[in-house]
Amino acid sequence: MFMQLSLNLFSLKSFHSTVIVFCLISLLILAIFHN
């Protein structure tokens, strides 16, 4: 039970950080194309 919960939390956290990285890369690409 606890193991499953922590695993879900970990996957959620890694998904969240993946989204943040994706957003940062998108902003970087936009900044490069604007210059």
Image (cartoon, grey):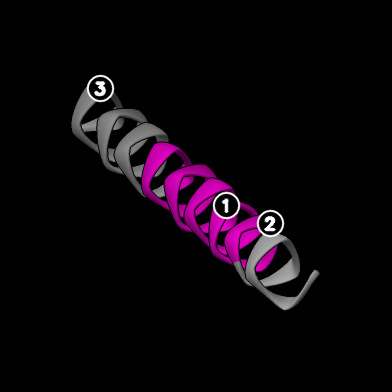
Q: Name the secondary structure under disc 2.
A: helix
Whether label 1 touches label 2, CB < 8 Å: yes
The quadrant of the picture occupied by the C terminus is bottom right
Label ID, residue 25? 1
- Quadrant of res 26: bottom right
Left or right: 15, with 20 as reference point:
left
Residue 2 lies, in percent from the top left, at 30, 29
* Residue located 75% across and 67% down the image: 31
Q: CA distance from mark 1 to mark 3?
A: 33 Å
Q: Residue tagged by mark 2?
A: 28
Label 3 neighbour load within 10 Å: few <14, some 14-19, many 20+: few
Q: Name the secondary structure under disc 3.
A: helix
Residue type highlighted by circle 3:
Met
Q: Residue tagged by mark 3?
A: 3
Label 2 neighbour load within 10 Å: few <14, some 14-19, many 20+: few
Residue stretch rendered in magenta on the structure: 13-29
The total number of labels drawn is 3
Residue type highlighted by circle 1:
Ile
